[in-house]
Amino acid sequence: MRIIIITLLFGMIGCQSNFPRFDKDNAFQYLLDQCDFGPRNPGSDGYYACRQFIIEELEAYADDIVLQDFRYREQVDHKTYDFQNIIGRFNPDADFQTIISAHWDTRPWADRDPEKRNRRTPIMGANDGASGVAVLLELARILAENPAPIGVNLVFFDAEDLGSPGLNETYCQGSRYFAKHLPIPRPDEAINLDMVGDKQLTLPIERYSYDFHPDLVRDLWDRAKDLGLDAFSGKIDYAIYDDHVPLYEIAGIPAIDIIDFKYPNPYANFHHTIDDVAENCSAKSLDQVGRLMVDYIYNRGGEREE
């Protein structure tokens, strides 16, 4: 009996990983927590409650927090708002520094909803907003408990989804301001997460990403295959103007975007509609992206989890 027990224990130890585990259920709870505040469109009660929630979570976990204030007059209703990018820094003295980012605001108008009466309604933004933030907050917890070998800057961009259709430069105001007025030393590269909670998650290679940082794209999508993360597809798809574009074009930071823009699939649309709710998202999808980000953080240039 003793020999069997030792053998079993040895086998268990041999199968254990030295790498932190991404807790998909905890991440999904972060998504639900944001949705509990309601829509987080600028100026709303949900907006201010969510901002405070993110800051308080980072206060519990991050080495440093940077709050970057800016102002912008949106071009639909011509209202001026005060905004805030939120940056949680981990291992800020490391030689190599990366950004992992997401936008935390939600769109004030469901302008793509099939029902005309809904098109002035703020969206819940469970996927378009809360999903990326959920992954970042779970990464913050992991980073606090497991110091990373690289510097990680978790950046929560504001005012991403306040733009006018067809006018790209009216979107991504938080990342545009960040890129013009870098509040931290210029990082070596950046990964933006957007719309990563879709139950039918499919993550092709976004075309600008391949142009901006092909080496990182190839590395991440190859690693996703090694890790059995089947949402990732090696196909190069649409070019999408997202927060990675200002980082690259304005600040010169090699940046990529991980995004499923076909939400929920090529034949239906929940994007910028009142159907962007938690019921159309899943913990499994957050896990696909979160596991890849953990692998990237702890194994960059070193040992890889199998």
Image (tube, grey):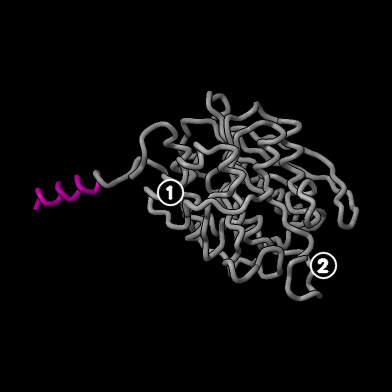
What is the C-alpha distance between the residues marked 1 and 2?
39 Å
Left/right placement of residue 223 relative to residue 215 reads left
* Most foreground residue, 188 or 10: 188
What span is in magenta?
1-13
Q: Residue at x 15, y 50 (%)?
A: 5
Quickly name the residue at label 2: 120
Q: Is residue 173 above or below residue 265?
A: above
Q: Residue at x 80, y 57 (%)?
A: 44
Q: Residue at x 68, y 51 (%)?
A: 104
Q: Is residue 71 magenta?
A: no
Left/right placement of residue 288 relative to residue 118 reads left
Q: Residue 132: x, y in percent?
A: 60, 52
* Most foreground residue, 62 or 250: 250
Q: Few, some or many C-alpha atoms within 10 Å of disc 2 (few <14, some 14-19, many ≥20)?
A: few
Quickly name the residue at label 1: 224
- What secondary structure is marked by label 2? loop
**Res. 271 visible in picture:** yes
